[in-house]
Image: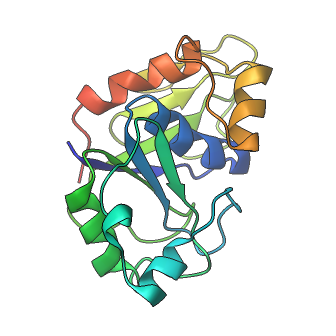
Amino acid sequence: MPAVAVWTPEDGLLGALAPLGLAAASRPCLMVDLDPFGPRYPGSKSLADIVRDGPRREDLSPSRRGIAVLRNGGITAAAAAEVVEALIEGWDRVVLRLPARGSVPPGVPVVPVRLILPGDLYPPQRGPAVYQATPGGLRAPGPGMRLPIPSRATVSALVRGTLPPPSCRWIRAWRRVWGLPWAR
């Protein structure tokens, strides 16, 4: 599975960190933000820049073992579709960050990431999902996998644009996602 899309409807912070966690769990990997109003991830280029200037050879394949992050830059997924397809073809693994509300690129499996919260605040997930644990020890409300609560050091590293150590429990837990079947 060379590409997956991550959809996190309830939480902005989890929506910014989940695709980074999944990308960090499978290096080398490219994370592309398809949300025109997404976070200002660090980096010298945006998806909008690559669409405007055309992709270069180094954009289309991994040059190192870490992860590359391509912030959005204010472009819609539809306007960037050709470039996104070329990036998926060139990289071994690609994580697409979807907006909380919006369309899904055709043919790319979607990994729903949901918070485990008490009560029925949000509609239940149909099918499997990745469930982010929260304080309180609640069980996942449906099929899929449960992530541990990330440490402060993990959240701080990802927000600063650095990778947590490979021994990080939260990053290690994301590795399972690459081997699971997700709906397209």
Tell me which residue sits at (68%, 43%) in the image.
161
Question: Can residue 173 be seen from the camera position used here?
Answer: yes
- Which quadrant is home to the C terminus? bottom left
Left or right relative to 151: residue 90: left
Left or right relative to 127: residue 121: right
- Up/down of 34 relative to 29, above or below: below
Q: Nearer the viewer, residue 134 or 138?
A: 134
Tell me which residue sits at (78%, 32%) in the image.
156
Tell me which residue sits at (60%, 18%) in the image.
165
Tell me which residue sits at (30%, 56%) in the image.
61
Q: Nearer the viewer, residue 124 or 14?
A: 14
- Which quadrant is home to the N terminus? top left
Left or right relative to 31: residue 45: right
Q: Nearer the viewer, residue 147 or 34?
A: 34
Q: Position of residue 167 (x, y in %)?
A: 55, 10
- Up/down of 93 relative to 147, above or below: below
Question: Can residue 143 be seen from the camera position used here?
Answer: no
Q: Position of residue 39 (x, y in %)?
A: 69, 60
- Up/down of 182 relative to 116, above or below: below
